[in-house]
Image: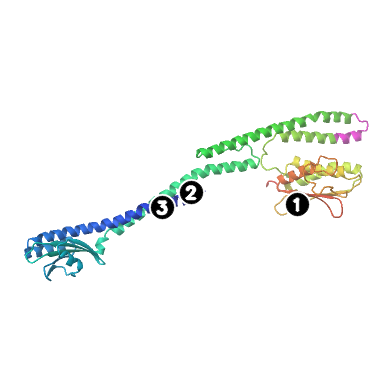
């Protein structure tokens, strides 16, 4: 936009300058020629006045004086073939002036000013003042140079003004674009400082209103989620009381751990629902989180006689997901294994570094029947009696970290879920 406005200013200013300077340059050339012609005419008339006295000595003195002082060659053509002054051809113009008519004649070499002097005893004399082409154009080149420099200066001024105008337009437009990008990234606190022309200020105000409206709607939605999650505390508390009242202490302890996990998840949902903006880029050690969650589910796998193979990286792997989100993602994927495969079905969890660019690759496989739907990651898609939200939540978690999720049925049978997690913040 800035370049286009500059080009528009250049084009407009150039057209105006051409329409103004070209006629002015022609006028300057015409005025220079007229000025030189007028000076030559004045000297020719002064010589003609002396010629009218019919005194040869006075005429010769006047011719010498005019030629020296005026700087133009003066020639007096006498009746017959005689002449006084500078040597000059007796052209058609002189013949025409000898008939009693004063004229100005343009020739390839310059301009002749011919003044007829009548009344002499021997006939009509013709006074010729010659202005060469160089004298006719004297001062024109310098004037044209001044006009050209003036036009160039005006063009530069026009470009400068257009550039400043473009900057005054582009700056608020760029601010609106930047705020739009920040809103798209989830920064709902971003606002525009309205500036520039009224139309752009109106756009900025509308964007601010839209951001405030979105923030209000999200606040209402998150508070509703938090309230709903808070209501889960009552049945969770009742479940804890039931677990405490169990006679089998081992079973009660195991159920209590599950209840603790559910309670922590409810607390996390409430905190996340009431938190708009993340403080910086989220990150955690995927090796530790995945190891902890697999250890938690291993007790249930042992009860159901499910063989488990765990393959974790030796070193910590930082990923761009918060600890709670990654734990919830792993829990959802492992829950699918237990919910949709029969007891005794083997499964495996593998976590390896993701190359290039950092991050991690989490692969969970089982020897069950696989996925009944060709695209199991679709929201609400389920081949069983579940809600069909687990894989979609895991997919969004992976994508928010800069990765992705792939779920498929292996050719050898069984399900395979591959979660690509993006790199976490540098440490």
Which residue is tagged 3?
15
From the image, state whether disc 3 or disc 1 is nearer to you: 3
Tell whether 426 sits left or right of 309. Answer: left
Q: Nearer the viewer, mark 1 or mark 2?
A: 2
- N-term-proximal mark, 1 vs 2: 2
Residue extending furthest right? 247
Which residue is farthest front? 99
Return the residue nearer the eye: 416 or 128: 128
Q: Main secondary structure of the magenta part?
A: helix
> How many residues crowd around disc 2 within 10 Å: few (fewer than 14), some, or many (20 or more)?
some
Structural distance between the alpha carbons of marks 3 and 1: 65 Å
Instruction: Tell whether 133 sits left or right of 348.
Output: left
Helix, strand or loop under label 2: helix
Q: Secondary structure at mark 3?
A: helix
Side (left or right) of 171 relative to 80: right
Q: Residue 397: say if magenta.
A: no
Q: Which mark is residue 5?
A: 2
Residue 148 percent coordinates (x, y): 36, 55
């Amino acid at each position: 936009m800035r370049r286009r406005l500059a080009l528009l200013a250049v084009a407009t200013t150039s057209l105006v300058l051409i329409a103004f300077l070209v006629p002015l340059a022609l006028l300057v050339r015409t005025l220079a020629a007229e000025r030189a012609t007028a000076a030559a005419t004045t000297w020719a008339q002064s010589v003609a006045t002396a010629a009218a006295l019919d005194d040869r000595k006075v005429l010769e003195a006047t011719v010498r004086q005019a030629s020296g002082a005026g700087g133009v060659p003066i020639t007096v053509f006498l009746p017959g073939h005689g002449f006084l002054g500078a040597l000059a051809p007796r052209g058609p113009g002189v013949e025409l002036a000898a008939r009693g008519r004063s004229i100005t004649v343009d020739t390839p070499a310059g301009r002749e000013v011919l003044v007829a002097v009548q009344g002499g005893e021997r006939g009509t004399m013709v006074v010729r003042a010659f202005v060469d082409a160089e004298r006719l154009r004297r001062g024109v080149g310098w004037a044209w140079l001044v006009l050209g420099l003036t036009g160039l200066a005006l063009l530069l001024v026009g470009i400068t003004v257009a550039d400043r105008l473009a900057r005054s337009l582009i700056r608020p437009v760029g601010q609106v674009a930047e705020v739009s990008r920040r809103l798209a990234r989830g920064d709902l606190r971003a606002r525009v400082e309205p500036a520039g022309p009224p139309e752009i200020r109106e756009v900025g105000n509308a964007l601010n209103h839209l951001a405030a409206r979105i923030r209000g709607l999200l606040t209402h939605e998150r508070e509703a989620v938090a309230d709903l999650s808070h209501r889960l505390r009552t049945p969770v508390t009742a479940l804890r009381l039931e677990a405490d009242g169990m006679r089998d202490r081992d079973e009660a302890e195991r159920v209590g751990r599950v209840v603790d996990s559910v309670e922590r998840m409810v607390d996390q949902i409430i905190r996340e629902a009431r938190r708009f903006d993340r403080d910086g880029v989220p990150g955690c050690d995927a090796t530790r989180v995945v190891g902890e969650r697999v250890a938690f589910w291993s007790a249930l796998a042992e009860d159901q006689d499910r063989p488990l193979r765990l393959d974790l990286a030796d070193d910590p792997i930082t990923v761009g997901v918060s600890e709670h989100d990654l734990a919830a993602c792993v829990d959802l994927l492992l829950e699918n294994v237990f919910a949709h495969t029969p007891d005794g079905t083997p499964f495996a969890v593998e976590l390896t570094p993701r190359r290039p660019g950092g991050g991690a690759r989490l692969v969970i496989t089982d020897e069950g029947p696989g996925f009944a739907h060709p695209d199991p990651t679709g929201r609400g898609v389920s081949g069983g009696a579940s809600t069909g939200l687990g894989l979609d939540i895991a997919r969004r978690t992976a994508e928010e970290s800069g990765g992705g999720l792939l779920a498929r049925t292996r050719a050898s049978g069984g399900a395979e879920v591959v979660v690509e997690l993006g790199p976490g913040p540098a440490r």
